[in-house]
Amino acid sequence: MIFLNDYFAAENVGEPRTDKILSVSTRFFIFSAANFILLFALSGVFAFAQETGGVKGKVRTANDGGIASVKIIARQKGEDVKSATSDASGKFVLENLSPGVYNFVFIKKGFADSLLSNVEVEKGQPRDLGDRLVLGIDQGTLVIIKGSVFDQNGRSVYGAKLLIEKISGDGGKPRKLGSGTTSQSGEFTFRQSEGTAKFRITATAKGASASKELTVDGAAIYRLAITLNMEK
């Protein structure tokens, strides 16, 4: 309005201000052109979104816990097309995929890579894959302790109670990590995160108790046997 008011004031005293008209016109043209480009770009994005689709879902563990930072890759004809990452609760959205059939690869350190194949993507809103996308633990990144419990005569002990503790290196109180019972064949398995550590496994049955300590230095399968001097 400043430019227009100055022009009209000058016109009243017989001094046309063409420079002000030029300034107003130029600014109006630039403003209009910018708006046009913006509207054109937005319409293009909207049209592109209407022509594409996607998928969404939730990645979780077997215990229903969401898994964060899982990389989800859309793969078509052997080529990686697009990717996304799950949030803190395991949820993800992978959009702007051209209609077609895709394979989806799920990758997360500490978990086994998983593949969901032959998923058809259509135009419009992302297809909901649900919350049944379960990733299993990568056995190669775990300390797996496998053992057996026997009585004094070498027979397998079924139903023996088990306790696994982590022994502190500074002489502190052992920390309980888990518990369980032996199978029909007297066997048991504990799984722990990889790394150097010292564990104590205690077996108890029919008034008898015995322990074994085990030092591990990385991801691998470790085996041990515990003998109980059980009452007859």
Image (spheres, grey):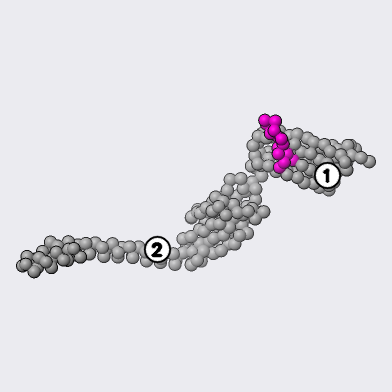
**Residue 50: percent from left, percent from top:** 44, 67
Extreme residue in the top direction: 170
Q: Is residue 84 visible?
A: yes
Extreme residue in the right direction: 232
Circle 2 sits in a helix, a strand or a loop, which is it?
A: helix
Q: Nearer the viewer, residue 217 or 48?
A: 217
Circle 1 sits in a helix, a strand or a loop, which is it?
A: loop
Residue under the point 83% across and 44% down? 160
Q: Nearer the viewer, residue 72 or 69?
A: 69
**Residue 97: percent from left, percent from top:** 48, 60
Residue 32 found in image quarter: bottom left
Q: Is residue 36 left or right of residue 124?
A: left
The stretch in magenta equals 164-177
Tell me which label, 1 or 2, sits earlier in the chain. 2
Residue under the point 18% across and 63% down? 2
Placement of the N terminus among the 4 image quadrants: bottom left
Residue 86 marker: none
**Residue 204: percent from left, percent from top:** 83, 41
Asked whether the residues under the numbered discs 1 and 2 touch, taking CB atoms below 8 Å apart as contact, a structural biologist would say no
Q: Is residue 154 visible?
A: no
Q: Amino acid at mark 1?
A: Ala
Q: Is residue 214 above or below residue 117?
A: above
Q: Amino acid at mark 2?
A: Val
Q: Is residue 144 left or right of residue 89?
A: right
**Residue 104: percent from left, percent from top:** 56, 56
Q: Is residue 52 above or below residue 156?
A: below
Inspect the magenta stretch and tell me whether residue 24 lies in it.
no
Q: Which residue is mark 1?
A: 160
Residue under the point 67% across and 54% down? 63
Q: Is residue 41 left or right of residue 205?
A: left
Q: Which residue is mark 2?
A: 45
Inspect the magenta stretch and tell me whether residue 169 lies in it.
yes
